[in-house]
Amino acid sequence: MFFLVLGFLVLVAGFAINTPAIAFSHYSRPTKVVGVILIVLGFVTSSIRQIDAGQVGVTSIFGNVSDRPLSAGLNFVNPLANVTEFDIKTQNYTMSASHDEGQKAGDDAIRVLTADGLEVVIDLTVLYRVVSADAPKIYSEIGTDYMDKIVRPITRTRIRDNAVYYDAIALYSTRRDEFQTRIYKTIEADFRKRGLLLEQLLIRNIDLPASVKKTIESKINAEQDAQKMQFVLQKEKQEAERKRVEAQGIADYQKILSTGLSDKQLQYEQIKAQRELAASPNAKIVIMGSRGNVPMILSDK
């Protein structure tokens, strides 16, 4: 555009000095040629617009916005058109209680009231992107500051609207995934109507009141104690069962010994022991008792 305007000025100056009464009127023709060259150069440079990767361009002429977005690369446009670029890569918007994590300075966490009337503080990150085909619609209806006009207020409002269906403890533990899925669906529908695509919704932290935290900790400790006692009782039952089986085995063994061994069996075992003793290379002394008694065996050691 600069060369285009400069070319028109030089061309006008060339016609202005084309008067014989002016001493340097002979420069009129070269001045006109330079003006024409500058106009052509300005027209060419203004007609070619480069859009970087991950961007999309929206053209507007005197307030009229084109419905056709400009894709990445070189594009030919009207030299008088204004081109506004939109980032179509994944963007994130974080609302956190930490002072250096979110887009806003200071504590920017979302404070909501739950079904039991308690205040819960939620840290959240929204991952989204601009739909390239809807960039002209965003430019004409919202503008380039869609983050502050759409992303932030819709997210905070929908989270507050849905938190009232959950108790604080359920929101923190058992129904957290359900809550995240529910707010994702509502926010995703609102974003889609305005040309934005919600990719992911991340609940980073849910901070409960101190009284609720204490109640949860007491409940967890009680459950752990109950599980520990159950384990001890189970162990004691297993030990008692083991002793019962052991006692029953001893009783059965004694019963077998008292009723099952005959004299002939004892004589047979005696003969086996004497054979093994005779086969042993060690010196030994065998004292034979009276008939029917078991011999006494004395080693030399």
Image (cartoon, rainbow, N blue to C red):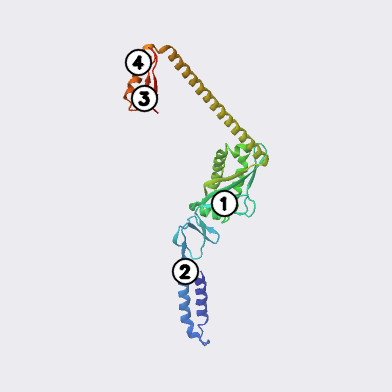
Seen in the picture, residue 254 relative to 65 is either above or below; the reply is above
How far is disc 3 from disc 1 in space, using C-alphas?
96 Å
Name the residue type under label 3: Lys
When the figure is inspected, residue 142 is found, relative to residue 248, above or below; the finding is below
Vertical order, 181 against 103 (above or below) = above
Q: Residue at 54% of width from left, 52% of height from top?
A: 92
Whether residue 195 is visible, yes or no, is: no
Please name the residue that numbered disc 4 is placed on: 268
In depth, the one of 249 and 264 nearer the eye is: 264
Rendered location of residue 129, percent (x, y): 51, 51
Which mark lies nearer to you, 2 or 3? 3
The amino acid sitting under disc 2 is Phe
Q: Secondary structure at mark 2?
A: helix
Cα distance, mark 2 to mark 1?
40 Å
Decide which of tag 3 and tag 4 comes sooner along the chain.
Answer: 4
Identify the disc placed on residue 93.
1
**Which of the two discs, 4 and 1, sits closer to the camera?**
4
Q: Determine which of the numbered discs, if any, sits on residue 43 in the image.
A: 2
Mark 3 and mark 1 residues within 8 Å of each other at the beta carbon = no
Disc 4 and disc 2: Cα gap in Å? 124 Å
Question: Mark 2 or 1 closer to N-term?
Answer: 2
Mark 2 Cα shell of 10 Å, populated few (<14), some (14-19), many (≥20) = many
Local crowd size for mark 3, using a 10 Å CA cut-off: few (<14), some (14–19), many (≥20): some
Callout 4 touching callout 1 (CB < 8 Å)? no
Q: Position of residue 102 (x, y in %)?
A: 59, 52
Residue tagged 3: 284
What's the amino acid at mark 4?
A: Tyr
Q: Give the number of the mark in front: 4 or 2.
A: 4
Q: Residue at x 53, y 80 (%)?
A: 16
Q: Is residue 44 visible?
A: yes
Q: Position of residue 229 (x, y in %)?
A: 58, 29
